Image: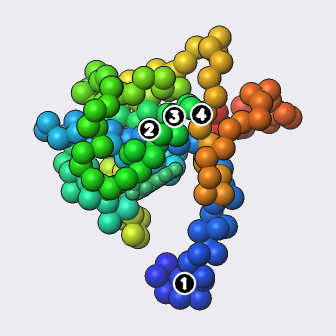
Amino acid sequence: MHAALTMKSLDAREFRNALSHFATGVVIATANCHGQLLGTTISSFNSVSLLPPLVLFSIARSALGLDLWRTADSYGVTVLAEHQTELSNRFARSGLDKFADLHFGAMDNGAPLFPDWLAYFECEPYARHDGGDHEIFVGCVTSFRYRPQTEVARPLIFFKGKYRSLASTDSIQSPPDLDVWLHAW
Ligand SMILES: Cc1cc2nc3c(=O)[nH]c(=O)nc-3n(C[C@H](O)[C@H](O)[C@H](O)COP(=O)(O)O)c2cc1C
């Protein structure tokens, strides 16, 4: 059945509440789109494929920057650390002046890069798909970096509509180390 029809019988608030039980990290997707800087806080980031190396995120059709995002010939995704809630809030606001008075660097492809990243991915557009009231951007990763394990840095977590921190970076019981866990990095 079409999603819009199904939603008639689903309570939208309850649907959001249920979805909020899926804990995610927080990233900021950025691009230098022909001189116009774009930045959007994103929780819908996910891994897709190893070969080719693909990631995805979805952007609301109501986002002011959507038309520019569609024209970006490269972009980047910065994975935020626990202390970067203010940065996350800044890039969750609508508007084109999000970079004003902000200190930031650049990825090799020109996409804005924020200090203290946990990891970042440089991407080229691979595909765009209909995602209902969102548009799904699939990016092909051309380059990436992540923090060495020796540096203790905790991710920013988004769960039940609030920012959270990891109580500990100790692992609890982990999946068995088997080749069958193809999608469980
Ligand atoms: C933690 C968090 C996660 C978010 N995740 C998404 C997301 O995955 N997709 C999205 O379209 N908006 C998401 N948003 C909202 C966007 O960041 C916000 O609507 C966007 O920055 C507006 O940009 P605009 O200037 O293009 O309108 C999220 C906001 C927060 C605080």
The reply to whether callout 2 and callout 3 are in contact (CB within 8 Å) is yes
Q: Quadrant of the C terminus?
A: top right
Whole-percent x and y of residue 27? 47, 40
The residue shown at (59%, 75%) is 13
Residue at which label 2 appears: 87
Residue 48 shows up from this direction: no
- Figure coloring: rainbow
Q: Amino acid at mark 4?
A: Glu
Residue at which label 3 appears: 84
User: Which mark is on residue 82?
Assistant: 4
Q: CA distance from mark 4 to mark 3?
A: 6 Å
The reply to whether callout 4 and callout 2 are in contact (CB within 8 Å) is no
The residue shown at (48%, 26%) is 117
Camera-nearest label, 4 or 1 = 4
Quick one: SS at disc 4?
loop
Above or below, 13 relative to 121: below
Residue at which label 1 appears: 6
Along the line of sight, the residue nearer the viewer: 110 or 129: 110
Above or below, 94 relative to 9: above
Quick one: SS at disc 3?
loop
Q: Amino acid at mark 1?
A: Thr
Quick one: SS at disc 2?
helix
User: Which mark is on residue 30?
Assistant: none
Whole-percent x and y of residue 46? 52, 45
- Among all residues in the image, which is located at the extreme right? 173
Residue 86 shows up from this direction: yes
Q: CA distance from mark 2 to mark 3?
A: 5 Å
- In the drawing, does residue 69 fall left or right of residue 50? left
Q: CA distance from mark 1 to mark 2?
A: 36 Å
Q: Amino acid at mark 2?
A: Leu
Along the line of sight, the residue nearer the viewer: 64 or 6: 64
Q: Amino acid at mark 3?
A: Gln
